[in-house]
Image (cartoon, grey):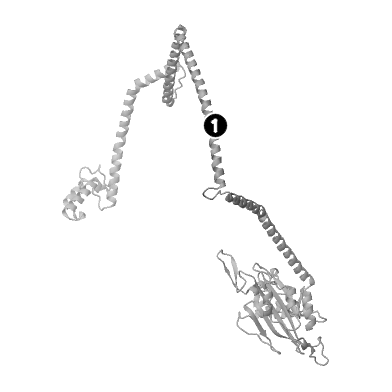
Amino acid sequence: MSDPDASLFYVAGATEGTTQWKAENLQLVNWGGFHGHSTVVFAPTTTLLSGASGTGKSTLLDAYIALMMDSNVPFNGASNDATIGRARGADQRSLVSYLRGKTDTSRNSEGDLADEVLRGHSSATWGALAMTFVDDNQRRFTVARLYYVPRTAAKDSDLVRKLCTVDGTIDLRAVEPFAEGKFDKRAVEGRFATLKMHKSYDEFSQSFFTRLGIGANGDGGKALRLLARIQAGHQVRTVDDLYKSMVIELPGTYAAADDAVDHFKNLEDAYKAMETEQAKADVLQHIPRLHDERAQALQNSALLDSLGYHGPGDSPFALWKLLTEDQLLETAEDSNRQQRADAKQAKEEADKKVDHLTTHRNQVADALRDNDSHKIVQRIDEEITQLRSALNESTKQRDIFDQKTARLGLAVANENDFSTAQQLSQQFADNFEAAFTARTEHGNDLQRAIYEPSREKSELIGERDSLAHREGRMDRGLHETRLLISQATGIPPYDHRMTSRSSENSSTSCPNKRTGARPSRRLCSASRGCC
């Protein structure tokens, strides 16, 4: 902490409201790519930040915005590529991504998108921001924010945030021991005497507005919002855009609407949390009963173990087991003995009854043999058995007959129908030979009638195929003979030319030569060598 006596150095006529405050240094702990504790010292006059893309210029500006301004102020445009959507929404940089040091996004083993972070991936982490201001009298005032990030934090509302002002300076490394306790107010204020924790941003901002002289009459909200617009680095294309973005204030209904949306979002999150807790309660409600049952079972098991149930050798349980088995065996033996006696008595009575019935049956048989009516009845029974067998055989024969005559379309229902069917079958048998002979002769006549045209058609087709693949109009048989001679002599078949005399003879004898008609086997039967 700075010396409280520094507040005694005053310039004559100067007051807190008229002195000028300047930023002296900015402390960052676990903010973006600044891992651990880092300090940026500012010059008393002007400080210029320069560096390549990705070196942390926008990260420092966002640290100042997160420290001094309300949570509805968006981070620097260069760090978000766009200002579309709600401030610090899911599609923009957020406190969670800065505090965990998000570097990239990749897919995990399950194919889901996951952030690659420098810290807090599988455990809780913390971070802090602090800006120390110094005035013309070398008095110092520090504004600080402390953050605790739970392992399950997914959005800014899941963070534990503490708003602090310090009358003097503070080294943020000194607050690390309090991170595990989520920066308990009593513990932190008890450790740092000049540190004050504020309950809300309004109380927090009003404290440093008044101390640093920001805004008229201590109302520095408009001044900070104007500064945030200037620092956003957006190109102003028209005067209209200039007035809309830097001069004209948004209506208060916008902020109220954002607060309402955040409120409903918090209500939705609370409702989901309640549902989750209720589901946990439903799952875990049976644990006490199961625990009691387990305790009772362990107690019973311990009792059995004390009686020697599981152990070998002699024990009270082994003795009880043997005595019980002996008693059960004696009871079973007495029961079996009684059942055997009852069964023996029942068998004797049944034997007596069998003997009595056998005697009675023999007496009845003797009486029937002496009675003639019994013989008649026995003979009738035998005839009935024979007739029944004959009926069954006749039924089978009738079924066979019906199957064989079904294709003839005969309906034989009585003896007259059967006689008619016999007469028809006899007539068919008598006329069968004559009809078969006539049918056979007719078939032979048809075959002879179609044989000669078919043969002539086959010869003509063969002649046509032969002429299509050779020169001249020689008969196919002669041409095939010429091919055989050529194959035997080795002379090409078309070198076998006819003499002039034979040609003349052929021209005088073949009508095809004179008329120019197509050769025909029937017309050239006198001389096969003409064509």
Where, by quadrant of the figure, is residue 405 drawn? top left
Query: Which residue is at the front of the view, 481 or 178?
Result: 178
Within 10 Å of disc 1 (Cα), the crowding (few <14, some 14-19, many 20+) is: few
151 w.r.t. 287: above or below: below
Residue 86 appears left or right of 418:
right
Residue 192 visible, this orientation: yes
Observer-nearest of 318 and 431: 318
Q: Quarter of the image containing the N terminus?
A: bottom right
Q: Is residue 498 visible?
A: no
Q: Nearer the viewer, residue 393 or 378?
A: 378
Indicate the secondary structure of the residue bearing disc 1. Answer: helix
Residue 38 vs 440, above or below: the answer is: below
The mark total stands at 1
- Compared with 119, 447 (above or below) is above
Residue at x 28%, y 41% (from the top left corner): 456
**Residue 169 location in percent, x, y?**
72, 83
User: 412 above or below 38?
Assistant: above
Residue 265, given in percent of the width and then of the height, sits at 72, 65
Which residue does the numbered mark 1 point to in the structure image?
A: 335
Residue 513 horizontal/vertical position (percent)? 24, 48
Residue type, mark 1 in image: Ser
Residue at figure coordinates x 29%, y 51% from the top left: 468
